[in-house]
Amino acid sequence: MEGQATEAAGVPPVVLFDFDGVLTHADTFELFVRDRYGRAPWRKLLAVLMLPVLVLLWPLTRRLQRPLVHIALLGLNELRYRAVVEDFAGRLVRRPGHFCRDGIRALRRHQAAGERVIIVTGCEHALVESLLAQLGLGGVELVASRLKSGPLGLRMAHHNVGAGKLKALTAHGIPAWHRAYGDSLHDLHMLRAAAEPVLVNGTPKLCKRIERALGRSIERVAWH
């Protein structure tokens, strides 16, 4: 097995964690976007005014969410965005029930065992980075979605989901991993490449679908 080979060579096993649904109980970036709209009613008005155009474009793009994210980020440069993210992260870490206690404990156990832990997520990099720092997990490696500067504010540069996670991991210098934790079919590519794939809080139906796709059994854990 790949993980056994790397251990024998003295290289610590690589363990991957998804973020939302594995270390949290909700979509973190969606909560951030909702917070942006809630604090600026003019963003809601702009979204409503753009809705007819978005509906017309939807059959072509299938990406209604992206323009709504762009409206949420309107007027932000990188410096201002980081300040906004820090404020939101500080409020979110104090919110009961957002983080998965069992998932955080599992991550810390892998760290204590000397394994190389990497969080691989579709959530935005600076937001996850800030949350991890405030949780005392600032040393964890992170492969996440990225934003870029646009003429009116920040925009999505790379959405780190599905097969895109494999490309991002390769660019990060991670060609193989021993264990991976995921919670949905979006994590299928990451789970397939793991010697020990783990499904977090998956329903029996989802587990069967993933096992059918993998062609093998998968470990299941129930985390709270």
Image (cartoon, grey):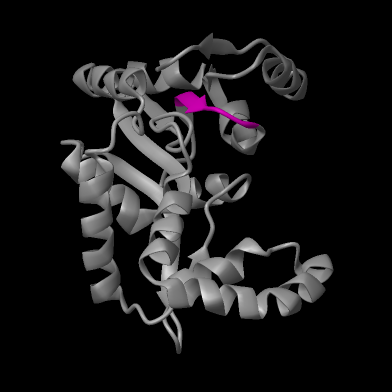
**What residue lies at 62% left-to-right and 74% top-to-bottom?**
48
Image coords of residue 116 (percent x, y): 30, 30
**What residue lies at 54% left-to-right and 76% top-to-bottom?**
45
The residue segment tinted magenta is 178-184
**Which residue occupies the extreme right position in the image?**
59
**Quadrant assignment, res 46:** bottom right
- Is 199 displayed left or right of 81 in the figure? right
Quarter of the figure that contains the C terminus? top left
Residue in front for this viewpoint, 69 or 44: 44
Number of callouts: 0
The main secondary structure of the magenta stretch is: strand
Q: Is residue 1 above or below residue 76?
A: above
Magenta run includes residue 183: yes
**Quadrant assignment, res 185:** top right
- Is 3 displayed left or right of 141 in the figure? right
Residue 20 appears in view: yes
Residue 172 appears in view: no
Image coords of residue 221 (percent x, y): 49, 12
**Which residue occupies the extreme bottom position in the image?**
151
Q: Is residue 7 above or below residue 86?
A: above
- Is 134 displayed left or right of 145 in the figure? left
Residue in front for this viewpoint, 89 or 160: 89
**What residue lies at 20% left-to-right and 37% top-to-bottom?**
135
Q: Is residue 176 above or below residue 224?
A: below
Magenta run includes residue 126: no
**What residue lies at 24% left-to-right and 24% top-to-bottom?**
111
Image coords of residue 124 (percent x, y): 41, 55
Image coords of residue 137 (percent x, y): 20, 36
